[in-house]
Amino acid sequence: MLDYHAAPNLLAEKVILITGAGDGIGREAALHYGAHGATVVLLGKTVKKLEAVYDELQAQGSPEPAIIPLDLNGATKTHYQDLAATLKQQFGRLDGVLFNASHFSVLGPFEMIGEEEWDEVMQVNLKSQFLLTQALLPLLKATADSSIIFTSSGVGKQGRAYWGSYAISKFATEGMMQVLADELSNTSTRVNCINPGATRTDMRARAYPGEDANTLRTPAEIMPLYLYLMGHDSLKVNGQSIDAQAIK
Ligand code: NDP
């Protein structure tokens, strides 16, 4: 999927929400979606990072973005319902969601997974997606063509030692995508998963501290799939889990 070329105006007039938009892959997706005409809603934990992305979007001439500071670990159903109401009031529409934010701290043996760590991973990586999707579906279903993208991982398809609750949360994300995609198969909303593959970000550096980051693809290099699944070229693609770095 590295060779897809998006039309410059692929996402014109679209409003797209991105979680974890302040850093890494989410930041790059925000810049690319904005560059292709979308109004991007930046959701994340660290306000300073979101503001920096906001400024970059403004500087590159993209439509004016919006910022939603939210810690997905503490957020409740009410936060997500309020968020949906705000989007409806401010923009009157929502054309896409990129669920990108994830919590990952360290690798470790299964027997050592702490209950608190398990709960945080499941809250941020899974339950927040369930609650936010429920809150946003009425808006997404109301548009002629909308796209939900979840973010998976290689360890969300094949379990691997020491990846613990993070890997399990990614398996569940794949499951949620499949259930939702099947339910929505006769609607105008499509649902898919992206597996970014090894990508040069802070999260990857935390998981592989000894690795030479220069051997990895950058977030910018894996953007073709993020654009493809968000734009109308993927209208008929539903229920798929796709590797961003797969060579066609
Ligand atoms: P980064 O750590 O660079 O970015 C993660 C983003 O998620 C940050 O913007 C962070 O915000 C946000 N986030 C984390 N916790 C919360 C929270 N509680 N509330 C709100 N936002 C939160 O990660 P990547 O860019 O590498 O990862 C992006 C996605 O890709 C993740 O889903 C990851 O699992 C997946 N992935 C990445 C791979 C890689 O090699 N990089 C490989 C496979 C999958 P803040 O900075 O403010 O904390």
Image (cartoon, rainbow, N blue to C red):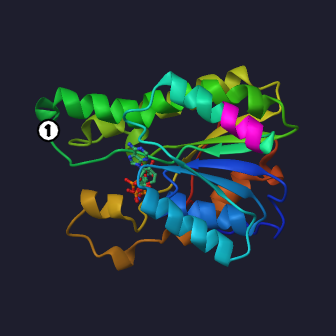
Q: Nearer the viewer, residue 79 or 229?
A: 79
Residue 59 coordinates in the image, percent (x, y): 65, 77
The residue indicated by pointer 1 is 109
> Is the N terminus in the top left, top right, bottom left or bottom right quadrant?
bottom right
Q: Is residue 132 visible?
A: no
Q: Residue at x 84, y 59 (%)?
A: 12
Q: Nearer the viewer, residue 123 or 83?
A: 83
Q: Nearer the viewer, residue 155 or 44?
A: 44
Residue 88 coordinates in the image, percent (x, y): 75, 36
Q: Which contiguous range is marked in magenta?
A: 85-90
Residue 221 coordinates in the image, percent (x, y): 56, 71
Q: Is residue 84 visible?
A: yes
> Is the C terminus in the top left, top right, bottom left or bottom right quadrant?
bottom right
Q: Residue at x 75, y 43 (%)?
A: 90
**Count of numbered circles on the image:** 1
Up the image or down, 195 lies above or below 170; here it is: below
* Main secondary structure type of the part rendered in magenta: helix
Instruction: Answer left or right for 162 relative to 41.
Output: left
Q: Residue at x 25, y 37 (%)?
A: 164
Residue 101 lies in magenta, yes or no?
Answer: no
Instruction: Answer left or right for 239 relative to 153.
Output: right
Up the image or down, 75 lies above or below 243; here it is: above
Residue 173 coordinates in the image, percent (x, y): 49, 33
Task: Estimate how packed mark 1 is, as few (under 14), some (14 to 19) or many (20 or more) residues with alpha carbons within 10 Å.
Answer: few
